[in-house]
Structures are given as C-alpha cells and as structure tokens.
Amino acid sequence: MNPADAELIRRTLHRDDRAAFGELVLRHQSAVRNFLRHLTRGDTALADDLAQDTFVSAYRNLAHFQHTAAFSTWLLGIAHNHWRNARRRQRDLEPIDSHHFDDSIPTVARSDLQHDLASALQQLTSDEQLAIHLGFHQGLSHSEIAALLAWPLGTVKTHLARGKEKLRHLLASWNPQT
Amino acid sequence: MESANLNLPPDNDARLAALLRSTHTDLPDDGFTARVLAALPPPTPSAVPFLERPAGRPIVLSIAALAGLALALWQGLSVETLRTLVPAVQQTTATASVSVTDPAFSIALFVTAASVLYAMKPRFLRLL
C-alpha cells in the first residue's frame, strides 16, 4: 500500500527524504498543473514553470503545513498565489486579456459534446470558470474553494450555481429535458 | 438578466456534473517530478555527518560520559570528594537564584533564549 501524504510529509521533514517529496510531487503534479493551465488559459509553459515554483515553495514551507486541510488543497493555494504574483508582474508588460487564450482546449479529437462543453465553459466569467474547475475538475468542496480563493462561501455557491445554469442553457440542445 | 433558478432538478445537475468531470484528464508526469527535484535547494551539509545517523548521538554521548567518568576517577574521585562538593553546589545554586531575581539579568536571559530559539527554529521544526 502506498504511504499516505502525511507519512511522506513526515519523512521529508524529518530526514529531508527527497524520494518521499518526489512521490508527493508525482501524486499531485497533475492537479496542480491542470489548475495552473486553467488559470493561465492554456499557457502550458508558463503553467509548468509556476507549478515548479509551487512545489519548490511547498518544499521550503512544508513545516508550516497544517494538517487541517488536504495537502492537495494547500498546494492549490500556493499555486494560486504564484499565479497571482505572475499576473501582477505581467500586467506591467502586457494586458492580461491579450494573453494567448485558447489551447486550454486541446486540439486532439474529442466528442462533439465535449467540444461544445469546452466552448460553453469559455462563455462563463473567469470566476465562474474557476469555481467550476475547482469544484468539478479538482473535486474541492465549497468550503475548500472558499478558503483557497479567500471568497465568502456564498460567493462560491453563487458562482457555481450561475456557472452551471449558464452551461445548462448553452448545452440545452444536448439534453431535451432542459 | 441571468436566471435566478438555482434549484434545478438533481438528476439534471448530476448529469452536468458527470459531464464536467468526464472532461478532466490526468496529465502524465513527463519528467516534471525530476525537474522539480532538480530545482530544490541542495541538502544542508551536516558539520558532523556521523551525528546525523540515528545511533550517532547516543554513541557520542555515551563515549563522552565514559571519558568524563574515567577522567574523574583518574583525578582521584571518591565519596569524600563528592561530599565536599555538595556545599559548593548549594552555594552556587543560591547565588544563581539571587541573580535570576534581578530584572536586568532575567531580561538578558530571556533575550538570549529567544535569540537561540529563533536561530535554531528550522532545526527544531525538523525534529518535531
């Protein structure tokens, strides 16, 4: 059986066990990189650079990790901070909206429904997209999303509800019941 | 204006949730973990690597204790010598307790202890 995250964290802290930390990275890299790809609107190179910074920060601050939240949620919080800092730096250079936008939808063949869903997601506001991503793709609870983004719980629920409502309308042709 | 209907049928909601989840794909590592490990700060070299081993510290302490005992015996340690030490220790303790009641001394002691704790914080955290 694979050791729990807590055991890997303990080994990293006590013995500076790099292999244990590597296992943590391996376990959570997909969630962190997906999250950052979402935030950077598909800029995979920037997302991976920020993901690397996220894990290095996590390593440096591992002793401060409170086991009250899931390790993955803590990592996503660090990733979000790194992205905000990067965006702040980037704002001085170019407007964020001019950033390349669209390879969040991979060009690989996908079903028509998935294609329509990806298009529909792009029509949501960025906050609604973020809430949907964290709630459905990352599987976070409402309170975890609220803690991670420093949003009131009601705001999270509103963004999720509005996002879903818009998606239902946009995808109505796929579902005769709507 | 956006719809205010936040109470849609649960069946419909579950279908949308399932659809959203189905679009999520796990990213292959593709060397990412190795890249992160290479970017980590280098391990802090130990001044005395032997002490980093699990049995290192007890062994060093035992050797030091035995060496101290041997030296004491060699210097003529006896029960009589120990008896003469007791009043001297008591006197030193009494002097120290007087010093501790001095506010300036207490503040200096506190500042020193706080400085040592702050300086050693990363090490203490690793031991916890």
Image (cartoon, coloured by chain):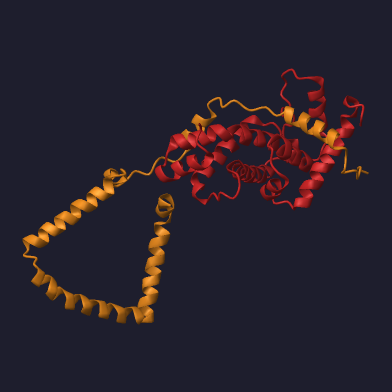
Chain colours: A red, B orange
Q: Please name the residue shown 49% across and 49% down the image.
A: A63
The quarter of the displayed image where residue B64 is located: bottom left
Location of the N terminus of chain B (image quadrant):
top right
| Residue drawn at point x = 40 percent, y = 58 percent | B119
**Rendered position, B117 above or below A32:** below
Q: Name the spot of residue A56 as percent of width and height, x first.
A: 52, 41
- Residue B39 visible within the image: no
Give the number of marks.
0
Which of A126 and A85 lies nearest the eye of the viewer? Answer: A126
Looking at the image, which residue is at 67% across and 43% down? A87
Along the line of sight, the residue nearer the viewer: A97 or A6: A6
Residue closer to the observer: A2 or A120: A2
Left or right of residue A132: residue A53: left
Residue B2 vs residue A66: left or right? Answer: right
From the viewer's perspective, tell me whether residue B95 is left or right of residue B82. right
Residue A119 in sight: yes
Q: Position of residue B71 (x, y in %)?
A: 10, 59
Q: Is residue B9 above or below residue A64?
A: above
In this rendering, is residue A133 above or below B28?
below
Residue A93 location (% of width, % of height): 67, 41
Rendered position, A40 above or below B68: above
Residue lying at 79% horizontally and 41% vertically, measured from the top left: A128
Q: Nearer the viewer, residue B6 or A85?
A: B6
User: Residue A168 at x, y = what percent?
Assistant: 87, 33
- Quadrant of residue A44 within the rendered picture: top right
